[in-house]
Image: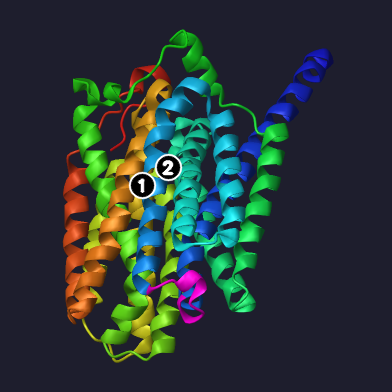
Amino acid sequence: MPSVISSHAPAQTGTDRRSAWTVILCWITVMLEGYDLVVLGAIIPTLLKTHHLGMTAGDATTIATLSLVGVAIGAVCVGPLADRLGRRHLLIGSVVLFSFFTILVPLANSVAMFAALRLIAGLGLGACMPVSLTMMSEHMPASRRARASTLTMTGYHTGAVITSLLALQVTDNWKILFYVLGIVGFVVAGIQWFYLPESEAFVHAKQATESQRVPFSELLKPAYLRAGIGIWLASFMGLLLVYGLNTWLPKLMNEAGYPVPTAVTQLLVLNVGGVVGLVVGGLIADRRGIKGTALGWFAVSVVMLACLSIKMESTILLDVVVFFTGVFVFSAQVLVYAYVTNYYPAAIRGTALGSASGIGRIGSIVGPTITGALVTAGIGHPWGFYFFAVVAVLGFLAVLTLPRRAANAQVEGVETVA
């Protein structure tokens, strides 16, 4: 008996250590993405005030749009590569790509170059989240996949908060924000090279399929098509809400008659609610079923968003409503990702998650654009919130169409994702 314990204890310790590194490094990678996707919005007022490179409001809008386009392309393209070449190498390569071009952004000598660098950096950035979520889901047992996705995404909001705090400190010296991100990214990539293990699920799937290529068209086969359409629509609606609210909530609140400090504070309250929602949503989804929880989350989101269209005299009541809006809206989107990681088998999981993220990124572009048009027309409040409520309804209907039984049930012992 002692000899048995002795022979197994070191192996278990090694496994635990590799698991810990997977969790930490994937979370930090998502945190970097959250930092990056907020950094441009944080510095645009400074860029316009100082007329950096002669930049206009239209130029800033173009740069922001191209950044998101790059993220969308990166998210779609990385999936098949991750399923063919491995999660580990794709994640490290993606971090290196966006870190390198992020450091170059402050050195741009024209608006066109600035935009091009942000576009290319976006390609690497877009690949980071789906690969990180895939690795985390494969690291966890099937019964904890929802928690894996939601807890990983708390890194995104943490990164956003860090950017906001740093931006307040550096004021006009905005270049530091990009240098910090790029340098930290390279450090993270170096640590990943030495300590991030490859996903065991990928290794097993690769051996089972004899390293066959898994094309995107695999998702269009009858076995996956119904789920794919529902996932793409739900992801589109979910990210439309996340980016639409994060971009325009302060302005919509200000139009409703709230003073600017109160309006800006609501963005912080919204994201704090988002972190809480991610933790709670993951726990409930693992116990009650991912699909059912996502339906409930989208349904409550409809109510919360509709409530925001009403002017509230009590600041406390407003804080409560905004907080619960963040709780349900932000985690509803991530529960869609959790469904993907639980529904698809390992051989095509990266492709499926990449497609969901990539198509969702189109929503991240559409949301701020439509809301901005409503603001420009002078009807941002209340019609902006009416628009968001309708989007949440469409997200609910999209989730409603998803199959209850996981496609990988026979492979991984998962009975349902209800």
The quadrant holding residue 57 is: bottom left
Local crowd size for mark 2, using a 10 Å CA cut-off: few (<14), some (14–19), many (≥20): many
- Please state, as top left, top right, bottom left or bottom right, where the C terminus lies in the image: top left
Which residue is at the front of the view, 317 or 357? Answer: 357
Mark 1, other Cα within 10 Å: few <14 / some 14–19 / many ≥20: many
The CA distance from mark 2 to mark 1 is: 7 Å
| Residue 52 versus residue 142 in the image, above or below | below
One can see residue 324 in this view:
no
In this rendering, is residue 16 above or below 372? above
The x and y percentages for residue 380 are 22, 77
The residue that label 2 is drawn on is 146
* Relative height, residue 355 to residue 310 (above, below): above
Colour mode of the rendering: rainbow
Quadrant of the image containing the N terminus: top right
Q: Quadrant of residue 104?
A: bottom right
Magenta part of the chain: 48-56
Q: Nearer the viewer, residue 227 or 303?
A: 227
Q: Amino acid at mark 2?
A: Ala
Residue 326 drawn at (x, y percent): 38, 66
Q: Which residue is under mark 1? A: 335
Q: Is residue 115 visible?
A: yes
Q: The disc labelled 1 sits on which kind of residue? A: Leu
* Residue 175 place in picture, x, y as percent: 61, 67
Residue at 71 percent of width and 40 percent of height: 191
